[in-house]
Image (cartoon, helix red, strand yellow):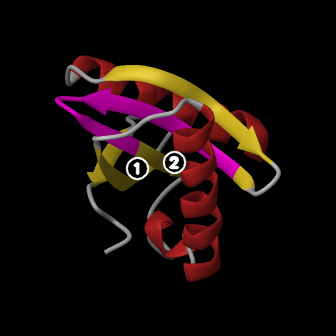
Amino acid sequence: MDKRLTGMLGEKLVCQWYTDNKYKLLAVNYRTRFGEIDIIAEKKNILVFVEVKTRKNDNFYLAKEAVTYSKQQRIKTAAVQYISQYNIDDINVRFDVAEVYNISENPKINIIENAFE
């Protein structure tokens, strides 16, 4: 399975996880000139920006380790763009990292809430 397809399947599984957990999906693959946000969801006045990292396994390193400080800054800048574009105010914001492992066999999803703190 190629890298792009692996990533798409991981995002699909994470979208389902958020939907199953009563989040409303607002956007998938939101793109700006500053960067991309994989998933934007909302639940109980919390706007959640999600970075999805999918790996075939967790033998070598954790997927969250790929979300570097500079990547976090690009996501935050894109989030500000989204909030501005849709005139969103008076809402709490959270940045999650969703790790997906073993995509082709028995997928395992690990959601790290407030991952950028």
Residue at mark 2: 52
Residue type, label 2: Val
- Start and end of the magenta stretch? 36-48
Between 109 and 37, the one nearer to me in the picture: 37
Q: What residue is shown at x 73% (from left), y 54% (from top)?
A: 35
Q: Is residue 19 left or right of residue 97?
A: left
User: Is 37 covered by the magenta stretch?
Assistant: yes
Residue at 39% from the left image edge and 31% from the top image edge: 41
Residue 86 location, quadrant:
top right
Tell me which amino acid carries mark 1. Answer: Ala
Dot 1 crowding, Cα within 10 Å, few <14, some 14–19, many 20+: many
> Looking at the image, do the residues carrying marks 1 and 2 touch, with CB atoms under 8 Å apart?
yes
Q: Quadrant of the C terminus?
A: bottom left
For residue 24, side relative to residue 82 (left or right): left
Residue 42, how many percent across, how many down? 32, 29
Mark closest to the chain's N terminus, 1 or 2: 2
Q: Tell me if 43 is positioned left or right of 75 in this view.
A: left
Q: Is 99 drawn above or below residue 65 in the view shown?
A: above
Residue 16 at x, y = what percent?
A: 38, 21
Q: Quadrant of residue 67?
A: bottom right
Per the image, is 38 magenta? Answer: yes
Q: Secondary structure at mark 2?
A: strand
Residue 101 seen in this snapshot: no
Closer-to-camera residue (85/15): 85
Residue 101: % across, % down: 44, 49
At 45% from the left edge and 46% from the top edge, which residue is drawn?
A: 50
Q: Mark 1 — residue?
A: 98
Please tell me whether residue 95 is drawn above or below residue 7 in the rendered image: below
| CA distance for labels 1 and 2 | 5 Å
Which structural element holds mark 1? Answer: strand
Q: Residues within 10 Å of mark 2 (few under 14, many from 20)?
A: many
